[in-house]
Image (tube, rainbow, N blue to C red):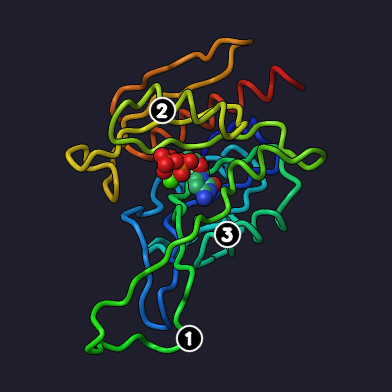
Amino acid sequence: ILRPPQPRPLAGKRVLITAGPTHEAIDPVRYIANRSSGKQGFAIAAAAQAAGADVTLVSGPVDLRDPAGVTVIRVESARDMLHRVEAALPADIAIFAAAVADWRVANEGEQKMKKTSAGMPPLQLVENPDILATISKLKEKRPPLVIGFAAETEHLIDNAKAKIARKGCDWIVANDVSPATGVMGGDRNTVHLLTHDGEEINVDSWPVMTKEQVAAELVAKIAKTVEKSS
Ligand code: CTP
Ligand code: CA
């Protein structure tokens, strides 16, 4: 079948994407996780690849196949994810779609924890490194366009605005992950794209779309921005 040549607006660009949840070990047989399916990050990787980019996808444990033509690096924990992201630099565009666990267990058991008469084991948590903030604050190796996600269940726009400032990223894709929306693990997403417009933060609210459509829109917006700045 003859198809017309597809436009490749991201040809020659290196795009780095994180996706999925992370797993934080409690002991050799147990872990802490979250409901992220990885679908949104995988869809963005596929869309960026289709736009001609050289794509590296660093993903936590998900039940998804590697998108064609994308370099996929599978990791478990937040710390693994950070190391593999750092090793994948430099990049022109970095998109942090992973639902990174905020905490890991401080006292990871070397053996399977057993029930004892002493009662339930106390789980001490420590904060994980913030991958998005770490990469946003790099000096020489900071990708020129750094995009984060903000998963919120309330005060979506205000929390997302605060996140742009706190993390030092350029754009945020904010989405409502309240259980009723079905976003976590589902096929659709309702997002608001926050971008810097000088001092102001511009909010673009998109209608409900499939995660593939969100990916295509985001990649189109990136392509427009990259075109303007080159
Ligand atoms: N993120 C990250 N590393 C972390 C935590 C978050 O890279 N340890 C990234 C996510 O991939 C996302 C963005 O930061 O792009 C925001 O994640 P989110 O969980 O919404 O924000 P947090 O800063 O963790 O704040 P909170 O969960 O308390 O709302
Ligand atoms: Ca978080």
Q: Answer few, some or many: residues within 10 Å of disc 3's Cα (few below 14, many 20 plus, some between 14 and 19).
A: many
Q: Residue at x 45, y 52 (%)?
A: 102
**Do labels 2 and 3 touch, CB within 8 Å?**
no
Position of residue 105 relative to residue 228, above or below, is below
* Residue 159, disc: 2
Spot the residue most to the left.
Answer: 180
- Which residue is disc 3 drawn over? 81
Q: Residue 1: tell me if it is visible.
A: no
| Mark with earlier residue (1, 3) | 3
Amino acid type of disc 1? Glu
Decide if residue 209 is on the left or right side of residue 1: left
Q: Is mark 2 within 8 Å of ligand 1?
A: yes
- Which residue is disc 1 drawn over? 110
| Mark with earlier residue (2, 1) | 1
79 or 203, nearer to the observer: 79
State the CA–CA distance, disc 2 to disc 1: 38 Å
227 or 94, nearer to the observer: 94
Q: Is mark 1 within 8 Å of ligand 1?
A: no
Under tag 2, what secondary structure? Answer: helix
State the CA–CA distance, disc 1 to disc 3: 22 Å
Decide if residue 133 is on the left or right side of residue 12: left
Amino acid type of disc 3? Met
Could you tell me residue 107's position as x and y percent? 47, 74
Position of residue 179 relative to residue 65, above or below, is above
